[in-house]
Amino acid sequence: RHRWGSPPAPSQLPSLLRFNLFIEKIVQDHYATFNKEHIRDITDSLIGHCQERKTTGEDTHIQLSDQSIIAIVNDLFGAGFDTVTTALSWCLMYAALYPDIQKKIQDELDQTIGRERRPRLSDRGTLPYTEAFILEMFRHSSFLPFTIPHRTTKATALNGYYIPKDTCVFVNQWQVNHDEKLWQDPSAFKPERFLNAAGTEINRTESDKVLTFGLGRRRCIGESIGRWEVFLFLTTLLQQLEFSLAPGEAVDITPQYGLTMKYKKCERFQIKGRFLSNGSP
Ligand code: HEM
């Protein structure tokens, strides 16, 4: 089965097979080294859950087969890997395109965390400009333009629209994130739009309008971990490194249509260490 529902095109099969084998091997390695006293990650936790049910003889209907464990790990990798790496690549692109904005993030990191230690998850509430930048990256790129297609299980009405049973429904997140009725100058990249006037706090009314993780019962289950990952990787990178466009590098950030949209062209960034006295990479 293709990651998110639709059947794979024949050209995708080899990489999908490789992906499945890759996950299968991870699960096998976990089985081989499993120790219920030392749960290392979600794969261990699923195996533990499975074995516990086997030994206690609990309701076998809910028992997970080994094959389902592979499928669940597969889904989590599939849904959680490309999304977070795509978010990070857009973060770096906006940082390189807007050096002043990148500098504001780095000033905030220098003032709040300093240079002696690496950023931690617990720093997140103390870096409003960085948080505003991440929100603006999600809004402006809208790299997941649509949510997963779902099907109505019964006829319903929404905002005065009648939707028959068995209709395919999904949300156009890109439209919401660029709606001129909701946003001032939606095509501009402005992290400040999410800050209060003093620049010290996130304006929750504005941030709640950004649509990135879907809506309702089938919204993303990895939202929280996804936001934390983007925060931690981005702050760790920008604390240490400065990203810029390489001279003569052809850059085209037109999003390429797909499940997650990547920018069209940028082969490399120029990267400098921030703490090296001669500034060399
Ligand atoms: C920046 C990161 C991420 C973004 C933007 C994102 C976005 C989304 C979106 C738009 C959906 C579809 C929601 C809908 O159809 O209404 C979704 C579903 C899902 N996401 Fe994420 N996601 C991210 C990270 C993750 C991570 C890290 C995981 C797992 C650890 C994950 C697991 C899932 C799963 C399992 C679903 C399907 C949920 C269901 O059908 O009930 N996602 N995600």
Image (cartoon, rainbow, N blue to C red):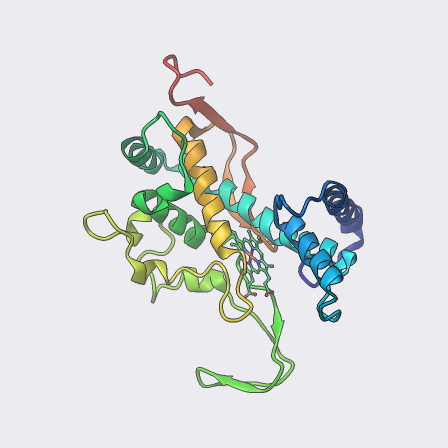
Between 19 and 112, the residue placed more toward the observer is: 112
- In the picture, the quarter occupied by the N terminus is bottom right
Q: Is residue 29 above or below residue 1?
A: above
Q: Is residue 156 visible?
A: yes
Give percent across and percent down for residue 245: 46, 30
Q: Hey, which residue is sitting farthest left in the picture? A: 198
Q: Hey, which residue is sitting farthest top in the picture? A: 278
Residue placed at 64% from the left, 52% from the top? Answer: 45
Give percent across and percent down for residue 104: 30, 36
- Image position of 193 (left or right of 241): left
Q: Is residue 255 above or below residue 145?
A: above
Give percent across and percent down for residue 9: 76, 55
Between 96 and 279, the residue placed more toward the observer is: 279
Q: Hey, which residue is sitting farthest front in the picture? A: 56
Residue placed at 77% from the left, 45% from the top? Answer: 28
- Image position of 29 (left or right of 278): right
- Image position of 271 (left or right of 2): left
Residue 71's quadrant in the figure?
A: bottom right
Assign ligand 1 to one image quadrant. bottom right
Between 7 and 178, the residue placed more toward the observer is: 7
Residue placed at 37% from the left, 62% from the top? Answer: 208
Residue placed at 54% from the left, 86% from the top? Answer: 156
Give percent across and percent down for residue 248: 49, 26
Q: Is residue 99 above or below residue 32?
A: above
The number of numbered discs placed on residues in the rendered structure image is 0
Q: Is residue 246 visible?
A: no
